[in-house]
Image: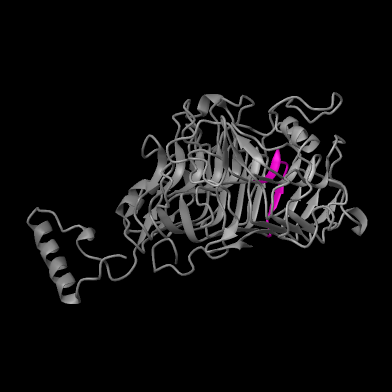
Amino acid sequence: MGQRSAPRRVRLLLALLGTLALAAGGLAPTAAAYDREEPQVLLVCNASTVSCPSSSTHRYGTLQAAVDAAHRGDWVLVWPGVYHEKATGSAGVLITTPGIHVRGLDRNRVVVDGSNGSAAQPCPADPGLQDSTGRSGIVVSKADDVSIENLTVCNYLSGSDGSGGNQIWWNGGDGSGQIGLHGYHGAYLTATSGYGSADAGASMAQYGIFASNATGPAEIAHTYASNMGDSDYYVGACRNVCGVTLTDAHGQNSAIGFSGTNSGGYTIKESEFDHNRTGIVANSLNNDDAPPPQDGSCVGAPQRSCTFIERNSIHDNNNPNAPVSGLAGAIGTGIEISGGHGDTVRGNRIQRQGSWGVVLHDFPDSETPPPTSNCQGGVQQTGVCVFHSYRNVVAGNAFSHNGFFGNPTNADVANESTTAPHNCFYGNRGAGGGAPTSDPADIQSGAVDGPPCGKGAGVGDDQLLFAELVCAAGFGPCPVPDAAYPQRTGLDLAPLTTQVSMKRPCAGLPRNAFCR
């Protein structure tokens, strides 16, 4: 909660004293000395692509300068231009003040660019124009209720140590194992990179729109992300309290469209994921996105699901030539739940996935965990933490033309886990409206993994399907000699295309020189 506003008489006295101090050559009291009665609009223009409007109103030349001057409730309004922001070694724009609002006047023409390129050609592909410092783009660090709207962020790349590379990041305390940010909003955002690499260890853009160690209420709406080495969208380190809705998102041409590690309590709806290596991955890991596991259940009601993947279009995620850095999902998969539980997958249209439309499986994590992660929610075995997949529901989805890689177990739906209570499948339709193809066969029958949901152990396929998943993710050889999944032959990058901008970016703002 912010400070209470000083009485009007006190504010007037402070203002008078400030005027006298300036007249005497001294310093006026800072705005932090008292809360302003009305929100201010701080204007940003650098005239890099469009001349600044004629006005005597003070303007800032960088987003960072305006953000540093802003107070809770203020607006940072950005004039069209290319802004090569590099405020710190780790962030292009660093926001630590809660409750401020950053908005561009044009989503496609306000570009925050991490490269060393020119304003004439933002988001360049030329390797010689890249900055591999290991910097992220716009970073909101432990500041509640910050909104970012109507702009593009591109070409912020990871460094040699893997740090950075997040285009837009609400960061509540990366690696802390704690929630340090409450409430955020993003809308009409584009996160991409004109540069990439086929080398998994190279500097590249890692994440498009990223939220970690943060809880809601939160919304990310009307956004586009592409060309990321890890994922277009990421929500992690918030177990079952993430509290965010992702709606009208479009993620393509990345290793993963949406990645949710050790997260739950979110909704992904009415969005599109295509031409990634893998569409959506909800997973548990014994890593610095602590605490595990991926938990889709409701707080205080573990038998109920509060995590929904619904009414999305998920198709053609079979791309071996998307940028990839680090752990990747199983290629050719629409939705993969890896060691997660309590999730609901319903009402989606899932098409042309070469491996599986939806696949659920346990995950044995052999990495050495940091101190904040101790196999919570998993089963510790010698040298490995096993996260089980259970109590997920896959219902009412429409599948067509999936499993065409033709390897054993490739199908519309598949379940590897035999853990109780079982993963439950019902009401799903295959091509032509019939039963979906599945592994195990007849997966929606009560004798396999169909209703009643919440019963005992599932049937699953913890033998051949598990081995095929290892092969499809590139972790090991295929169990069948003739089995094959697409291999990298080059690098594909999606072009930067015009996206829908806010129709009335001046709506709701106080009067200012940019909005007349």
Q: Is residue 140 above or below residue 182?
A: above
Residue at 70% in and 29% down: 474
Q: Is residue 290 at least partly visible in the picture?
A: yes
Q: Check residue 271 for magenta coloring.
A: yes
- How many numbered markers are drawn? 0
Above or below for 351 versus 484: below
Q: Which of 66 and 164 is in front in this view?
A: 164
Q: Which residue is drawn at 88% across and 51% down?
A: 442
Residue 8 vs residue 204: left or right?
left
- Describe residue 173's horizontal placement relative to residue 278 as left or right: left
Q: Nearer the viewer, residue 308 or 252?
A: 308
Q: Is residue 261 left or right of residue 455?
A: left
Q: Which contiguous range is marked in magenta?
A: 270-281
Residue 447 placement (x, y as % from top left): 85, 55
Q: Nearer the viewer, residue 355 or 258?
A: 355
From this viewpoint, is residue 305 visible?
Answer: no
310 within the magenta span: no
Residue 146 point in image, percent of width and height:
42, 57
Residue 49, percent from left and from top = 49, 45
Question: Which quarter of the rendering shows the C terminus?
Answer: bottom left
Colour mode? one colour
Quadrant of the frame with the N terminus:
bottom left
Q: Which residue is drawn at 9% across and 62% down?
A: 20
